[in-house]
Image (tube, rainbow, N blue to C red):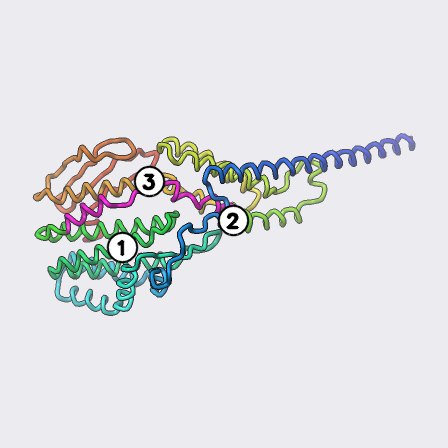
């Protein structure tokens, strides 16, 4: 019996060591294959024109001289949500509750912010704006972008005061300056610069629409609106999404690798014997790049294809990052919604709405309902419609529910104006 027990024990120990040796050899083979797969995915991504590192996203344009770089001036502007709220309220009262008191309050607010206005007057006249975009996980967008939004609101208030006082040439000058700020924000066309640029541009268009609605005797506002709406820069969808893969890989390298090391320390040494898979940043990176390449390849397709492919890719990315809690928690930064992947469609919708609005402002008195047969929704090709409810014009562009619920463009807006 004793010999039998010893024999069984020896066999068990031999089996354990054989299993360990087998799994070690398999793990080495898997590691080699995963590194090879990662290298292959990196090569394919670069061949596709998809940057995979922050270094590959380095701006291709030469840096401007300091005396040509508007970014150095925007950096001096202190943005504040409190200031923006006060400016918006002052403009609302000035335009929709005209009185000597509200005119004086708007003038006082502009005087209080005259240093900021002097800075933006200088910045908007410069030929270049090279903002130092520190791309990567956990880095907030450069302060210049929030400064641009603040200055656009101040320029709008200054223009609205000029429009209210009948100084249309000064108001139009301020609208042109808002568009200049928008062009400077655009930079080389990554995601955050583009959405900042388009916010400022649409803000400038809306100011012209308000002035045209409120002061119809000044036809220059409507003509400027129509011209600027037609000149809205087309969104280049691949340029907008060009930084996503590099940013996500940055997240894996900085948070994900740390997670993996911590997981290995927590895991018992016998985990690999029984087939437990430890977090593997090499495999995760390869799977993320493959998913990002799927997104990249579908961006020139129709919205239907994009929704399908991006949905598949987002699921794959979430699975790949599941082993890395710190990275997974912030992965939604990179795969958060449809806006980024359908941005060219949404940008077209805004442009079409403002073109239709400029035409609608010609039709005084406004008809209750009318359609622009030559202006079509980029989603389903249906004509753009306009409705007047006695108080405001509403421009609607059709959009499938599967994509989004698009609100009509309203002039004046609903917020008590």
Is 264 or 183 nearer to us in this picture? Answer: 183
Q: Locate residue 1: give its quadrant.
A: top right
Horizontal side, residue 391 vs residue 58: left or right = left
Is 46 or 385 nearer to us in this picture? Answer: 46
Magenta-drawn stretch contains 192: no
Tell me the residue at 24%/60% (across/down): 155
Horizontal side, residue 294 vs residue 199: left or right = right
**Circles 2 and 3: CB atoms closer than 8 Å:** no
Q: Secondary structure at mark 1?
A: helix
Q: How many marks?
A: 3
How far from the left and from the top, in percent, is residue 290? 51, 36
The earlier-in-sequence mark between 1 and 2 is: 1
Distance (Cα) linking label 2 and label 3: 26 Å
Tell me the residue at 78%/34% (across/down): 18
Magenta-drawn stretch contains 247: yes
Q: Which residues are magenta?
A: 221-249
Q: Which mark is residue 250?
A: 2
Q: Locate residue 114: give its quadrant.
A: bottom left
Depicted 391 relative to depicted 310: above or below: below
Distance (Cα) linking label 1 and label 2: 33 Å
How far from the left and from the top, in percent, is residue 356? 19, 41
Residue linked to disc 3: 344
**Circles 1 and 2: CB atoms closer than 8 Å:** no
The earlier-in-sequence mark between 2 and 3 is: 2
Q: Secondary structure at mark 2?
A: helix
Judged by depth in the image, the label closer to the viewer, 1 or 2, is: 1
Residue linked to disc 1: 180
């Amino acid at each position: 019996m004793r010999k039998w027990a010893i024999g069984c024990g020896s066999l068990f120990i031999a089996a354990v060591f054989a299993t360990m040796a087998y799994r070690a050899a398999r793990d080495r083979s898997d590691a080699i294959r995963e590194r090879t797969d990662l290298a292959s995915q990196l090569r394919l991504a670069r061949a596709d024109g998809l940057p995979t590192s922050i270094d590959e996203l380095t701006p291709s344009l030469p840096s401007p001289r300091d005396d040509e770089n508007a970014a150095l001036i925007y950096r001096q502007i202190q943005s504040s949500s409190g200031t923006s709220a006060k400016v918006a309220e002052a403009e609302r009262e000035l335009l929709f509750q005209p009185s000597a008191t509200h005119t004086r309050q708007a003038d006082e607010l502009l005087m209080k912010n005259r240093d900021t206005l002097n800075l933006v007057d200088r910045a908007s006249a410069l030929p270049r704006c090279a903002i130092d975009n520190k791309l990567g996980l956990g880095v907030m967008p450069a302060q210049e972008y929030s400064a641009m939004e603040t200055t656009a609101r101040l320029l709008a208030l200054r223009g609205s005061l000029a429009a209210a006082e009948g100084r249309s040439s000064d108001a139009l000058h301020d609208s042109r300056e808002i568009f200049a700020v928008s062009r400077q924000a655009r930079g080389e066309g990554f995601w955050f610069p583009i959405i900042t640029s388009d916010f400022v541009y649409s803000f400038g268009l809306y100011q012209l629409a308000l002035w045209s609605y409120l002061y119809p005797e000044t036809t220059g506002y409507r003509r400027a609106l129509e011209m600027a709406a037609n000149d809205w820069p087309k969104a280049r969808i691949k340029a907008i999404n060009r930084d996503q893969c590099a940013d996500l890989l940055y997240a894996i390298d900085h948070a994900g690798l740390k997670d993996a090391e911590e997981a290995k320390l927590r895991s018992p040494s016998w985990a690999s014997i029984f087939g437990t898979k430890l977090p593997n940043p090499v495999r995760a990176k390869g799977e993320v790049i493959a998913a990002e390449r799927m997104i990249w390849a579908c961006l020139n397709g129709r919205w239907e294809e994009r929704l399908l492919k991006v949905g598949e890719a987002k699921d794959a990315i979430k699975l790949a990052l599941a082993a890395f809690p710190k990275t997974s928690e912030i992965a939604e930064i990179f795969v958060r919604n449809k806006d980024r992947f359908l941005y060219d469609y949404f940008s077209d919708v805004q442009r079409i709405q403002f073109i239709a609005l400029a035409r609608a402002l010609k039709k005084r008195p406004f008809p209750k309902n009318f359609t622009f047969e030559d202006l079509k929704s980029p989603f389903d090709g249906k004509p753009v419609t306009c409705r007047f409810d006695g108080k405001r014009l509403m421009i609607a562009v059709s959009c499938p529910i599967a994509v989004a619920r698009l609100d009509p463009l309203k002039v004046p807006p609903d917020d008590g104006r």
